[in-house]
């Protein structure tokens, strides 16, 4: 069943479906070695990767397996990253959360804010029971984002990927519907 990507708003952010005009900004984001230092793939060196990423997101929507949303800052309309629900399984009522933000956007609470909005949609509209996320064990900032959202660290995937030629572990986090705190009940973003 298709899962149309929503358009979601917070006071500071607009989460919206990607369009073809986002390819240059998306490429710049994934071509940044600092942003990609904990990813299980190399920095992008060809702009075509951005076009494929956008097309793959559309395929996920049509197949009903996920939704990727561009994240724009409301104050100036700047593209600052993306947030996604992937591997949506309606039978198990589960999905995986992913996100990526420009280094200039770090430290402002944008990732937490965007993910909180997307999780609200996931639990309220998709009626999910569980959302999972994985993070490189060296990426403490991303782990903090998940913990602010209420995710619980459930375990470690030992040597599960190679990041920039280095064998790396990942932490697995899970958030259950009964543990979810909507934005109105959450602590303020710092």
Image: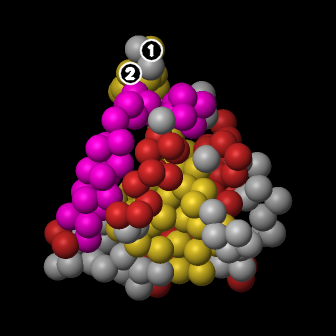
The numbered mark at residue 189 is none
Instruction: Tell me where residue 125 appears, x and y as whole percent.
Output: 41, 85
Whether residue 77 appears in this view of the structure is yes
Q: Secondary structure at mark 2?
A: strand
What residue is pinned by disc 2? 162
Instruction: Tell me where residue 70 appears, x and y as whole percent.
Output: 48, 64
Instruction: Tell me where residue 133 appears, x and y as whole percent.
Output: 46, 50
What residue is pinned by disc 1? 166
Residue 103 position by quadrant: top right
- 146 or 177: nearer the eye? 146
Which quadrant holds the C terminus?
Answer: bottom right
- Tag 1–tag 2 contact (CB < 8 Å): yes
Q: How many neighbours does mark 2 have within 10 angstroms: few (below 14), some (14-19), or many (20 or more)?
A: some
Compared with 24, 76 (above or below) is below
What is the magenta range? 32-61
Mark 1–mark 2 Cα distance, whole angstroms, equals 5 Å
Residue at 37% from the left image edge and 68% from the top image edge: 19
Instruction: Tell me where residue 159 appears, x and y as whole percent.
Output: 39, 21
């Amino acid at each position: 069943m298709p899962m149309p990507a929503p358009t979601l708003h917070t006071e500071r952010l607009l989460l919206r479906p990607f369009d073809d005009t986002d390819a240059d900004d998306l490429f710049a984001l994934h071509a940044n070695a600092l942003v990609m230092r904990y990813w299980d793939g190399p920095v992008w060196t060809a702009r075509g990767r951005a076009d494929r990423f956008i097309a793959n997101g559309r395929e996920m929507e049509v197949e009903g397996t996920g939704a990727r949303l561009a994240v724009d800052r409301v104050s100036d309309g700047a593209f600052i990253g993306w947030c996604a629900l992937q591997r949506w399984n309606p039978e198990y009522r589960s999905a995986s959360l992913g996100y990526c933000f420009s280094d200039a956007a770090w430290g402002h609470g944008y990732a937490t804010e965007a993910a909180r909005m997307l999780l609200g949609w996931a639990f309220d509209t998709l009626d999910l029971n569980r959302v999972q996320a994985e993070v490189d064990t060296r990426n403490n900032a991303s782990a903090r984002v998940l913990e602010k959202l209420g995710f619980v660290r459930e375990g470690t995937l030992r040597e599960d990927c190679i990041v920039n030629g280095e064998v790396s572990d990942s932490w697995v986090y899970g958030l259950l519907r009964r543990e979810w705190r909507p934005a109105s009940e959450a602590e303020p973003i710092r």
